[in-house]
Amino acid sequence: MLFPHTHLLRLLSLAFLAFLLPAAGYTAPPEANKVRVDAVTGLRAYMQKNFMFNPTYHVWAVDLDLPEDQIDEVIIHVEDPGYCGSNGCQWAILRREPDGSLKEIDGFLADDVTLKRDPRSNVIQAIASSRRGDSKLEIANKTSGQVQLARQKGPTKRSTRQFSAPCRNGFLWTGGASDKGGVARYETCKQDEVLVQFSCQSDTGSIAMTFAISPGSYKIGDTMPALFSVIRKKQTTFFPNPGMLKSSGTKGPVLSVRFDRYDGLLDALKQGDRAMFNASGTRLDLHLKGSSKALAAMLSACPDGRHY
């Protein structure tokens, strides 16, 4: 028996809607959580830094981890041909760092993102949907609620580990830890001049690195790019976040660069033979004999950033 024409159209419409709509129990990021760009502090600057050509995008603020922490994660959907592919368009989930900045915890191509709340834990699971199927986004232990929980637990017991490597070619590596955090330095053997200093932040485990430079056309407060190269059997190059030119008092300006302890630079330093740091025409060449133990001593004082 043939379907009547109107009946057939209705069935086709329902089938098409069933294909488009998420499975039962899932909801798209709710319109009630859709926000303006300016409502999310720092988002416009984040987009300008990470996305070229001012693409069209949509923003939601949703608490994806622990509702009681009262801190929303930010979901971004970049709806622009320049950021789309065969698997959909660009999405990103951002968390709010303790210093107020935004950091991507997951980025992916998808046609849609759906959300499902776990009735037991009350945590929202995000699912990316594309023509290849659904994929659960692994954002556990990466969201802002984890940072808040770590803070609420109070200060942890810090190591007081100290290390000093043998002198080599006039320079050595030292590392130390205390209740206030950890420091690793590349300095003269007399320990009267520090060329490079790493310090891990006691609240998040991120790393700040400073070294003296010739400012060139830059002035105090300006940001500038930096290039780090680590050489072992082959050269590995890192472009960390732009650094800020700061005053060190009587010793002239220093460049302060902050980066994530797990972005690969520290591991490369521990395993490398020598390193080169370049910024604003200043180049530093460092041997890495003893750097592994110096950096380990520094990190023993700071929290494990992977839990955040």
Image (tube, helix red, strand yellow):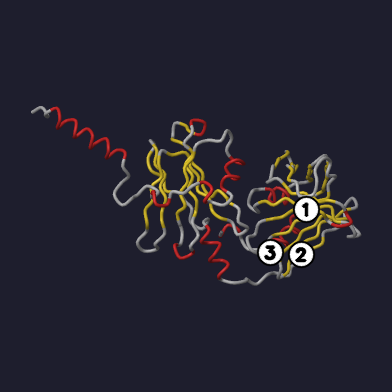
Count residues near mark 1 (Cα–Cα under 10 Å), then give few for <14, some for 14-19, many for 20+. Answer: many
Q: Is residue 232 visible?
A: no
Q: CA distance from mark 1 to mark 2?
A: 16 Å
The structure residue drawn at horizontal position 82% and vertical position 54%, both measured from the top left corner, is 247
Question: Circle 1 is placed at which residue position?
Answer: 210
**Closer to the camera in the image, 159 or 197:** 197
Who comes first in sequence, dot 3 or dot 2? 2
Which label sits in the foreground, 3 or 1?
1
Residue marked by disc 3: 300
The CA span between labels 3 and 2 is 9 Å
Residue 176 numbered tag: 2
Residue appearing at x 44%, y 31% in the figure: 86
Is residue 105 visible to us here? yes
Looking at the rendered structure, the kind of residue marked 3 is Ser
Give left or right: position of 192 versus 219. Answer: right
Mark 3–mark 1 distance (CA, rounded to whole Å): 20 Å
| Left/right of residue 33 with respect to residue 272 in the rendered view | left
**Vertically, is 105 above or below 156?**
above
